[in-house]
């Protein structure tokens, strides 16, 4: 009689190399019963990659790739580039509770690791408010402009869409320009000091609007643009003292 367990490597490990061993294998029982509180039916597939999967436990307090402050490897630069070794990605999850799957919206949970990188909590929330406020009307399928663009696309044989004249494409180009301007402003604020890497937002087109990626200097090797005001990492990675700062006793000597 075969034992029920996680002996199968295909079931024990996720396809995401950063996730490592799956912590959900022993929790998912394949049930499709309704969740408490009228949320609806659970997702029956154990291979779902949607971060809003109701079968996933709350991993916000556990240090790892699912933690908001976890510095991911930078997949947006070549592997042999200097940026690959000197930068990391802080990934902001999508918030499925705002508009569901009608529009890509992002969580406003502030990762404290962005503070020493040069992105304050106030600036972070301003960015989230700007992006969510733009993306919701852009992707709203019931807005009169999107309905009009659909009718015009049908009449013109989708030439209207190919020419980029739709409301959605026009607004998305404008939003990408705003992100580029934000990155330029961050580079100016960081100054021209050697070794300083300014934070930047990765294009939403590159991430497929599935997450919001902040590129920051690697907390382990790269200098930050400002001093941290609190803990720079997760609960299992306390902030380390700056080795370049000498104690007062040695300075006086």
Image (cartoon, helix red, strand yellow):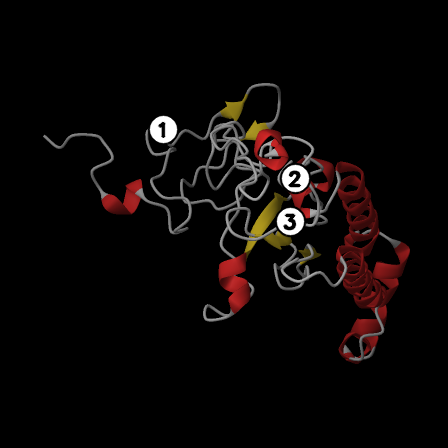
Left or right of 79? Residue 87 is: right
Depth check: 158 or 253 in front? Answer: 253
Dot 3, crowdedness within 10 Å: few (<14), some or many (≥20)?
many
Q: Nearer the viewer, mark 3 or mark 1?
A: 3
Q: Residue at x 84, y 60 (%)?
A: 146
Q: Where, by quadrant of the figure, is residue 69 drawn?
A: top right
Task: Say which residue label 3 marks.
Answer: 224
Which is closer to the viewer, label 2 or label 1? 2
The x, y position of residue 237, in whole percent, is 49, 33
Residue 106, position as x, y percentages in the image: 69, 44
Quadrant of the rendered image containing residue 201: bottom right
Quadrant assignment for the N terminus:
top left
Between 100 and 152, the residue placed more toward the observer is 100
Q: Position of residue 81 (x, y in %)?
A: 51, 70
Residue 132, x across and y down, in percent? 78, 46
The residue under the point 33% across, 40% down is 21
Left/right placement of residue 204 relative to residue 67 reads right
Number of residues whose C-alpha sits closer than 10 Å to that of mark 2, classed few (under 14), some (14–19) or many (20 or more): some
Which mark is drawn over residue 96? 2
**Which mark is in front, 2 or 3?**
3
One can see residue 101 in this view: no
Secondary element at image label 3: loop
State the CA–CA distance, disc 2 to disc 1.
24 Å
Labels 2 and 3: the sequence-earlier one: 2
Quadrant placement of the C terminus: top right
Numbered tag placed on residue 29 in the rendering? 1
Task: Please report the residue visible at 80 percent of the width from the left and 75 percent of the height from the top.
Answer: 164
Q: Give the answer, above or below, for where 235 lies relative to 173.
A: above
């Amino acid at each position: 009689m075969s034992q029920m367990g996680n002996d199968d490597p295909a079931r024990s490990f996720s396809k995401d190399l950063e996730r490592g061993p799956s912590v959900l294998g022993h929790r998912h029982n394949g049930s499709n019963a309704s969740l408490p509180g009228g949320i609806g039916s659970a997702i029956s597939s154990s291979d779902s990659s949607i971060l809003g999967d109701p079968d996933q436990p709350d991993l916000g307090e556990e240090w790892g790739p699912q933690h908001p402050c976890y510095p991911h490897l930078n997949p947006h630069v070549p592997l042999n580039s200097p940026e690959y070794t000197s930068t990391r990605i802080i990934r902001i999850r999508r918030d499925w509770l705002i508009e569901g799957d009608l529009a890509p919206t992002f969580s406003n949970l502030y990762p404290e690791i962005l503070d020493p990188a040069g992105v304050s909590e106030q600036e972070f929330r301003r960015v989230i408010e700007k992006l969510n406020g733009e993306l919701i009307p852009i992707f709203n399928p019931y807005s009169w402009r999107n309905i009009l663009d659909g009718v015009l696309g049908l009449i013109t044989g989708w030439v209207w869409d190919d020419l980029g004249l739709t409301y959605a494409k026009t607004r998305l180009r404008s939003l990408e320009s705003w992100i580029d301007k934000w990155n330029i402003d961050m580079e100016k604020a960081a100054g021209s000091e050697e070794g300083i890497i300014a934070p930047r937002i990765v294009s939403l087109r590159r991430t497929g609007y599935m997450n919001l990626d902040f590129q920051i200097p690697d907390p382990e090797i790269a200098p930050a643009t400002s001093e941290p005001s609190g803990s720079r990492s997760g609960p299992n990675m306390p902030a380390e003292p700056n080795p370049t700062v000498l104690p007062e006793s040695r300075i006086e000597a």
